[in-house]
Image (cartoon, rainbow, N blue to C red):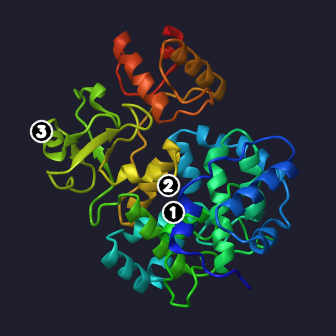
Amino acid sequence: MRTAPILTAAVLMSALATPSLAAVSCGGSFGDFTSRMKAEASSRGYDKATVDRFFASVRQDPAVIRADRAQGIFQMPFTDFARRLISQNRVQNGQRNAQRYDTVFDRIEQRWGVPRGVLLAFWAFETDYGAVQGDFNTVNALMTLSHDCRRPDLFRPQVFAALELFRRGDLDPARTTGAWAGEIGMVQMLPGDIIEAGIDGDGDGHVTLKTSPADALMSGANMLSRLGWRANEPWLQEITLPDSFDWSQTGLETKKRVSDWKRLGVKGRSAALGPDRLEASILLPQGRNGPAFLAYPNFDVYFEWNKSFVYVMTAAYFATRLEGAPVFDAGNPTPALSGAEMKALQQKLTARGHDVGGIDGILGRMTREAVQKEQARLGLPADAWPTRDLLNRL
């Protein structure tokens, strides 16, 4: 693809990092919005010919908005979600890909200290190891979500990152496709992430995340490292807890050294706990009667990749499975609230002054924290798992 001359370092930094003084507002006519985006692109240092070619075929995509509004899968409890995503076929394909790309994973582990299981889990969940990468036009998706007023500030910078990839010859605005939210390639990275963390793993001079496993996996590892991954440290481990455990000590907000957890009777279910010096939190994704895990510092990095608690838990757990851990003990958790009940709970929690991040029916991190505080206030086991008893008492 023919591209414009290379931008200077100063102009490039401005184009990618600093919004213009007159930031483009969302909403209104899509045609007018596109004109405003083109004007901002020019103000960021891109020449008119490049801007015109990039925006020439852009269209609003109603299917993107429908996908954005229909993320009900994240309302599922951890056990159900994990069973849905972690099939025997995905486990076996993960093992085969670990062997097939053993040299690539060796390079990754040596350079960034990110275990192959972690990347294999993302690869599996995001695109089924590259088989299902999405057929949404990337630029159309990003422009549609930037025009929509629900989260424009999240997606608008990605349009200009996509423009930069186009200028480099690594994105075709008419043909590049991916997920509905604008992610591209085997591990689904946004254009800005590709610019910041993209790695040419196969040495062909381009970062090609759609067709090159080496590029995709090494870029994913570099991105995790830039997000704070601590080399050669654990991230999640299934544990057992004594019956007398103080459930209010669980949750991401409570961190203790592994040595302190040991003194409280915490044990690894299938292997010894990690180094005593590490700080960790105890997570009960479905309360005290369900599975229990110890989350190490690297677990927090998962939330930089995806904000959904149930997705993060499942991806982190699947990574341990691919590294040899057994199937988790599901226990016998109290039945989950329905979507309507969860929304009613969130409304009641909000009325009591808690910030749950929105009434969406999803048991996310903020809702869990609020639930645990109310359980403690009411004298209930404070395990952050909402029950109908809690809903009725509130």
Say which residue label 2 marks. 305
As rendered, which of 391 and 233 lies closer to the eye? 233
Report the side of 37 relative to 73 (left or right): right
Image quarter of residue 241: top left
Q: Nearer the viewer, residue 169 or 224?
A: 169
The amino acid on which the numbered mark 2 sits, given as a three-letter code, is Trp
The residue drawn where x is 50% and y is 10% is 394
Give the alpha-carbon distance from disc 3 to disc 2, as whole Å: 33 Å
Above or below, 236 against 162 in this view is above
Camera-nearest label, 3 or 2: 2
**Front position among marks 1 and 3:** 1
Disc 3 or 2, which lies upstream in sequence?
Answer: 3
Q: Is residue 78 above or below residue 369?
A: below
Vertical relation: 189 (above or below) 212:
above
* Mark 1 lies on residue: 122
**Quarter holding residue 226:** bottom left
